[in-house]
Image (cartoon, helix red, strand yellow):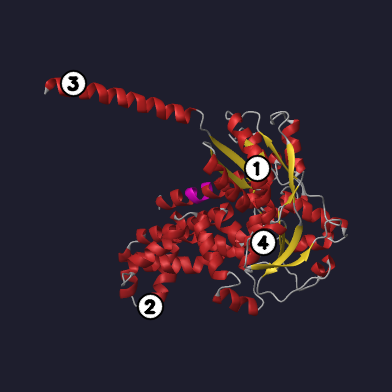
Amino acid sequence: MIFSFETWQITVFSLSVGLASTLLILPFGVVLAWLFARKTWPLKSFVETVVLLPLVMPPVSTGLILLKIFGRRSPIGQWLYERGVEIVFNWKGVLIAMSVMSFPLLVRSVRTSFAEVNPRLEQIAATLGASPLKIFFVITIPLAYKGIVAGALLAFSRALGEFGATILLAGNIPGETQTLSLAVYNFVQIGKDSDAFVLLGITVALAFLFVWSSEWLLRSGNKA
Amino acid sequence: MYRFKQGMRKSLSVAAVFFILAWTQANAWADEILVSAAASLTDVLKEITSGYQAKSKHTVKFNFGPSNGLARQIEEGAPADLFFSADLPQMDTLDKNGRLEPGTRKNLLSNQLVIIVPADSKLAISSPKDLLKADFKKIALAEPSSVPVGVYSSKYLSDEGLWEQVKSKVVPVQDVRATLASVESGNVVAGFVYKTDAAVSKKIKIVYEVPIDKGPKITYPAAIVKESKRKEAARDFMTYIQSRAAKDAFKKYGFVVLD
């Protein structure tokens, strides 16, 4: 089982869609985190709360909301279906579930990194004639970059471990939407505990690797 | 006044003790049993049980789900008193592992497989081969390797020589009621359920009934769990579900009652 094609396929699928979801949310997460760290605006607390919700709500609840939004009978789902895009019981459902569930973690981590960037440095750059966009890319991002990568790694780990929203939105279809977490559940359901343990081992090893790297980056950032 | 109060106190305490004794005695033989039953039995057993509880001092709690999951729970020591499965293999496994009370196992019901589509679907099936058509993009099926209705359905499709091709369209779900729900939602094009499940939903319609002689032999056995601490109550309920009233209820819901 350990080196079977099936294990390999499930692992590669999980890593690929996890990576895609992290890259997808990265620009949105970074921009939103910056807005949270640097600006205030009406309804800011409301937006902060909504962004945080998937982190604290039961994943199946979030999955149910996503299912209702993207299901065939909803306006959005119907619109997408007519254009040949299927989300439910499809890898795209896995992508969306992972993105939504890991987004709050990314925003929180990156926000903290931005908050740690001394605003005086940004102000100095402004006095020297730099435009806000230039300041953002030349000053803020390079100073916060370790925190951004750490946040992305954390979000990626969360995406890999995602279960509740994924199983509702994308289903547990072997070869199509079955991630590592879903496969563990499936093996337990059908009584193949030993196969489940193999995948469990892979999941733990990957999670350990990515979370440890994330923490290491944050620690090394502080020495600067 | 004091004497009167003393007398009142005595009579009240005697009365209190009497009532406590009467109450405990009344409940001493009243048990609450836990019945683990196949998901397809949800509605019919609830109806049968309200009739039972009106007559009996015992109460019944249910644990509905896929029979393979229920069997597994019992295997791991779940406190079920009675197990009502949708197929024989689950009961056989428990039997082999000595989890059943000897002499209590009995085959009670049979059922029929049907293919359903959402109520507003325009698709029709004249033979199971139609499932190969491009219109049938996704078909819901309870886990085909272990859940009874999934095992029955995949075996049927296998016997028809269609399983290899239909397999890639299958969305495996938890149990027969999850299959029903996914077809109702419109997120799959069709699904395999029992005829009795199709009967309880108005949001789907049957497009094909698997002929009894072509389809797999469906048998629902029931048995009392060996480790049950409430065997008397379990036996009482087991007798009741074989009574005239219960049999009529099963037939009303579309089950085939075995004699």
Q: Quadrant of residue B140?
A: bottom right
Distance from the alpha carbon under mark 2 to that under mark 3 = 95 Å
Chain letter for mark 4? B
Using the image as rendered, state which of residue B253 and residue B120 is in the foreground: B253
Residue B236's x, y, as percent?
61, 35
Query: Do the residues under discs 3 and 1 have CB atoms within 8 angstroms?
Result: no
- Residue receiving disc 2: A131
Circle 4: residue type: Ala
Distance from the alpha carbon under mark 3 to that under mark 1 = 54 Å
Distance from the alpha carbon under mark 4 to that under mark 1 = 21 Å
- Residue receiving disc 3: B6
Q: Which mark is residue B241?
A: 1
- Of circles 4 and 1, the one toward us is 1
Circle 1: residue type: Ile
Circle 2: residue type: Ser
Q: Quadrant of residue B24?
A: top left
Distance from the alpha carbon under mark 3 to that under mark 4 = 66 Å
- Of circles 3 and 1, the one toward us is 3
- Of circles 2 and 1, the one toward us is 1
Label 3 Cα neighbours within 10 Å, binned few <14 / some 14-19 / many ≥20: few
Residue A214 highlighted magenta (yes or no)? yes
Q: Which residues are magenta?
A: A212-216
* Sooner in the amino-acid sequence: mark 3 or mark 4: 3
The answer to whether residue A161 is left or right of residue A8 is: left
Looking at the image, residue A197 lies above or below residue A67: above
Looking at the image, residue B73 lies above or below residue B232: below
Distance from the alpha carbon under mark 2 to that under mark 1 = 80 Å
Chain letter for mark 1? B
Label 1 Cα neighbours within 10 Å, binned few <14 / some 14-19 / many ≥20: many
- Residue receiving disc 4: B199
